Image (tube, rainbow, N blue to C red):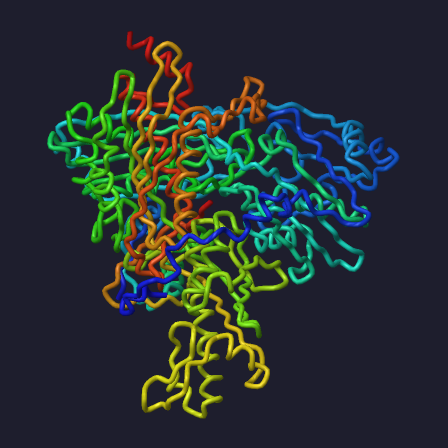
Amino acid sequence: MAFDQNSKRIFKLVGSRPPRPDGVEKVTGRALYGADMTAPGMLSGAILRSPHAHARIVSIDTSAAEALQGVKAVVTSADFGVPDDEFLRDVQDNCMARGKVLYHGHALGAVAATSAAVAKQALALIVVDYEILPHVTDVDAAMRPDAPVVQEGRSLENVGPGLSQNVTSYCEFGHGDLDAGFDQADLIISRSFKTAATHQGYIEPHACLASLSADGRGDLWCCTQGQFFVRTLCAGILGIEASQLRVTASEIGGGFGGKTTVFIEPVALTLARKSGRPVKIVMSREEVFKATGPTVSSSMDIKIGMTREGRITAAQAQLRYQGGAFPCGTVEMGAQAAFAAYDLAAVQTQGWNVLTNRPKEAAYRAPGAPMAIYAVESVVDELCQQLALDPLAVRLMNAAQKGTLSSYGPTFDDIGLRATLEAAQAHPHYSAPLRPNQGRGLSCGFWFNFGGNTCVSLNINTDGTVGITEGNPDIGGSRASISLMAAEELGIPYDKVRTIVADTSSLGYNDVTDGSRVTFSVGLATIEAARSAIKVMCGRAARIWGIEEDAVIWEDGCAKPAGPNAGAFPPMSLAEIAAVSANTGGPIAGHFEVNADGAGVSFGVHLADVEVDPETGATKVLRYTVFQDAGKAVHPDYVEGQMQGGAVQGIGWALNEEYIYGADGRLQNAGFLDYRTPVASDLPNIDTVILEIPNPGHPYGVRGVGETPIVPPLAALSNAVSRAIGVRLNELPMSPPKVLGAIMQRG
Amino acid sequence: MVRVKIWGSLRPLADGQSEIELEARTFKEVLDQLGARYPALRPQIKRGVSMALNGRIYREAWFTKIPPESEVVLMPYMAGG
């Protein structure tokens, strides 16, 4: 769907900031989240989780639990089939361990009872005989040939010899002659980096209510980023036809990628099937940390060569990502993204995905990219420091632009990297003075963005209002943006449009809300659905006027004769046409179904100022500015919110957040008290600068904005802290003890 | 004739080539011909690939037309958060 290049339209509504449509319900506590759903006769579900990092399940005795009064069903892996499809089997085995528990917190049994207290009591009565196995939680240790093997036989054909079976896949990207490139460099820096696994930190724990009646028809209400994908997974695991399982997404209290799969839903459905009653499961915060999907943790080697003038001559990265106990494909994304910001003649990235005894990773905004770009941007910054070059000027000198052969293969179309760098260079933040113990860091960021399967139905109501039905949970303001685009296209006020998110029985398949795809894809489908409805309305007006349909145009929310030759009829508004729709052919609607492509890649640049306390190693963020190309900011409040939210999550990743495992392989900080996310009092206002370089693949020029903002903060913070203390830091998070240690080593 | 660039770790599965010339008019024809000519590529094609056509990424659209002289790059299947 191409950008409307010829129209050069001046937007009337797109780009404005109307009040958010979900605001009143959320601030008055009326919005219904996953845990708010109830049903008559509902049971409470609870899940038994492994206390061990790695163990064979010798036996499970559930008889005492089943005998407890109030217990209506107990399930283990024996109550599930074994899906033929490997991906589905992994999803199921992650929800309910089969044969072995693979990480601390892995589910291996579940109970449905008349109360949460009885369910909890019943869990304590389940007797499990474990044969404890050696475990591994560190990525480098897991790659060694003698490492404990998490799962056997999972390596793909592309993994080379000499590595543990834990290495499941290998990838390589790049072009050019690396040796020749490094020969041209005046300075080459090679560094190794590590980043910890972090959690998305959404406030709302996973929750669902499942009902599965004796006739095989099911309903599932859950907090998710994709009700259609939940249906696909649950129907596959339970052997239900898709048409017989209706999944409804609740309001969502944050997801950020972590709610793109299932953890409890197939268990609740299985308990509901066995008990014959609705079953609700709500995860505790501890369960969220132990048994949902954090990011990968990483170990990386970066080598970059630069001339003394600042031109990068060659660049190389080796990325090792551990994604927990099941195979993942995250390193491929990091390996492609690592050097995307640069125009390079010689570049190579290699990546390995590795199994460990940790929970299976899940997506987290731009999955795989933040850690790779952190490492690359850290080395670029160190090169600039050693060569006494301005880091922003160096990025501009090497910036990818239209026509650049990207490091991952394609040649870039219109991109906004140079514009964001120039905006950062011209911003007062970049030239503001710094005091002792303060440092300024800079980083570029990148994400691919994509479109995907999308359906939109747009109904013209007889009172002249418009209802839009779409299928993607609203995690970033999409209902407002979709209503704005519909109102813009139809030429009616924004408050005449209401957008709702449909269940899986009300609309065709929609991909998950991920990949920064919704404002792009659903917006595109909405515009096309509106155009379809406009065509119908023009036809109705033509019939009323007795003229040809192609003699009618749509302008400012009205059908009008195309010119004087078409007749002298007064314009008919959408409301007037809708009011007589029963007389002119029946209800008026537009719909559009597409697998959208052309999302357009996104770049951002972040500037961070920090002050480090030399006595404690604590870092305070003093000033932070985000520059990002949004293509077209449909609702700038939400775009700024995405930019600010991504920056804050990245700041947490850089400074404090980490999964900490003990020598026993157990997670030691499964709660927000010990897993420290930034709160408002930790942060300055996050300033934002939106750039609008239209995406040629969208009628209004929209690009996704949700993921890119989490990419640059890691390096921006690391570069700022490193410059503040005069020592390069190569490991995240930069918690106070690590920073203090670096200061003390410096002397 | 279309020249399809493949990523580095696929090259050993395609006789070491980084670019492959095919008679293909659509994304599907590219995939079918790659799989037919280099059976070792089939597992990866089955797991999922994306295609960048003149810089624009397509994830699944089999019938995306490939104009002559287009830049076609095979990429891993895109995933996001």
Question: Is residue A183 among the parts visible in the rendering?
Answer: no
Quadrant of the frame with the C terminus of chain A = top left
Is residue A580 depicted above or below A604 in this figure? below
Up the image or down, A682 lies above or below A531; here it is above
State whether residue B17 is above or below residue A147: below
In the rendered image of this protein, does residue A5 appear above or below residue A206? below
Instruction: Report the side of A156 relative to A242 (left or right).
Output: left
From the viewer's side, name the closer residue of A582 and B52.
A582
Residue depicted at x 74% and y 41%? A78
Which residue is drawn at the image coordinates 56% and 33% (left, top)? A359
Report whether A54 appears left or right of A657.
Answer: right
**How many marks overall?**
0
Determine which quarter of the picture holds residue A565.
bottom left
What's the residue at 43%, 72% (across, down)? A557
Q: Position of residue A530 (x, y in %)?
A: 46, 70
Direction from residue B8 to residue A531 in the image, left or right: right
Q: Position of residue A453 (x, y in %)?
A: 48, 60
Q: Is residue A53 visible?
A: yes
Instruction: Classify residue A219 by image quadrant.
Output: bottom right
Task: Give the quarter of the figure containing the N terminus of chain A.
Answer: bottom left
> Quadrant of the rendered structure where residue A350 is?
top left
Residue A58: horizontal and vertical position, in percent? Answer: 72, 29
Q: Residue at x 39, y 81 (%)?
A: A560
Q: Nearer the viewer, residue A560 or A643?
A: A560
Locate residue B3, reporting x and y percent. 26, 60
- Name the outermost residue toward the top: A747
* Closer to us: A154 or A724: A724
